[in-house]
Amino acid sequence: MPPPAPLDTAREMTVHRNQQGSSTTMSLPPPQFAESAFDEPAIPRYLEQAYWWAYMHPGAVHLFERDWLVNAILFGNYARLRDASLDELGATVQGKTLQVACVYGNLTTRLQRRLAPEAALDVVDILPIQLCNLAKKLPKDKRVRLLQADSCSLPCPEAFYDQVLLFFLLHEQPQEVRSATLAEAMRVIRPGGRIVIVDYHRPAIWHPVRPLMRFVFRQLEPFAAELWTQDIVEFLPADLRPRSVHKERFFGSLYQKLVLIR
Ligand SMILES: C[S@@+](CC[C@H](N)C(=O)[O-])C[C@H]1O[C@@H](n2cnc3c(N)ncnc32)[C@H](O)[C@@H]1O
């Protein structure tokens, strides 16, 4: 374990803030936060330009934080995709897990419920508004930390986590950011650990929603169509290829779950 780094508690929202530690709790070294306002992670341009309406605007959380709407956006597949990713992490989730980016819906609360008593979960997101929204959804739990950080520059040492979850993040990122996020996930996972990715995939040619999704991507999701033309693994830098890759497709291949073992 590396020596403890300075903490800027304003930017760590532990959901267990007021609880006492117990001897069975796994101890995580504090993440390395910026020490001054000048070092705060900058909000990426693509988020400000392409996704302000979905994540940054105060009205966005109010609008999108509804289970039925999240499910409708995924054509009724939310529970299936959520459970497919959680099952990959385990019926009881052991060890140290990192969720990269908050999501609307109950994915993280379900993940928290599966944590073994001595397990630990970190959730990172670049937007404080999204971390605050998640903090409201989660019960107090000393095993869970919510951290402000950029997925391209995670505040933790190499090989720190046993598993990493990326749920519908990569399609929202431009190619170079997507590559950097995947490289960071590979860096922070231990050898033999797994990265679970759920995201869009090229749908079957006959898929009735194909034209609709093309339209939606053109209007609202400028980078998403890249997942229709390239395998996610191809975005990884060549020297960081995983030891194994398992892909499962859902709903006429519109969605995919990838499990990468480092
Ligand atoms: C996971 S994605 C989309 C998930 C899905 N559409 C949903 O909300 O159900 C949305 C989150 O990713 C976060 N995000 C985007 N780019 C990020 C980055 N570079 N670093 C950390 N978080 C990022 C956004 O702030 C937002 O909270």
Image: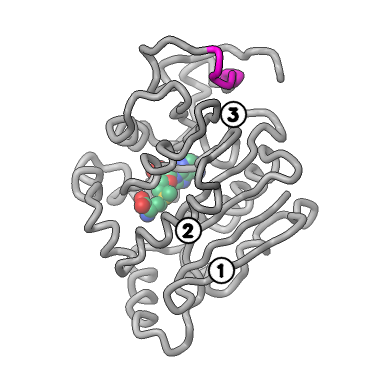
Categorize mark 2 by other alpha carbons within 10 Å: few (<14), some (14-19), many (20+): some
Mark 1 highlights which residue? Answer: 248
Q: Is residue 70 left or right of residue 201?
A: left
Residue at 71% x, 35% y is: 159
User: Which of the two labelled residues, at mark 3 and mark 1, occupies the earlier sequence position?
Assistant: 3
**Eyeballing the image, is 224 above or below 145?**
below
Alpha-carbon distance for marks 2 and 3? Answer: 27 Å
Mark 3 highlights which residue? Answer: 155
Q: Residue 68: x percent and y percent?
A: 22, 57
157 or 223, nearer to the observer? 157
The amino acid on which the numbered mark 2 sits, given as a three-letter code, is Ala
Q: Is residue 27 magenta?
A: yes
Residue at the far right: name it. Answer: 239
Q: Residue 117: x percent and y percent?
A: 50, 27
Residue 13 visible in the snapshot: no
Alpha-carbon distance for marks 3 and 1? Answer: 30 Å
Categorize mark 1 by other alpha carbons within 10 Å: few (<14), some (14-19), many (20+): few
Look at discs 2 and 3 and give the one toward the viewer.
2
Q: Residue 209: x percent and y percent?
A: 35, 80
Q: Which residues are magenta?
A: 23-30
Q: Is residue 154 magenta?
A: no
1 or 152, nearer to the observer? 1
Q: Give the main secondary structure, helix, strand or loop, of the magenta stretch.
A: loop
Q: Is residue 236 left or right of residue 258?
A: right
128 or 120, nearer to the observer? 120
Q: Are marks 1 and 2 in contact (CB under 8 Å)?
A: yes
Categorize mark 3 by other alpha carbons within 10 Å: few (<14), some (14-19), many (20+): some
Mark 2 highlights which residue? Answer: 84
Residue 135 visible in the snapshot: yes
Helix, strand or loop status at disc 2: helix
The amino acid on which the numbered mark 3 sits, given as a three-letter code, is Pro
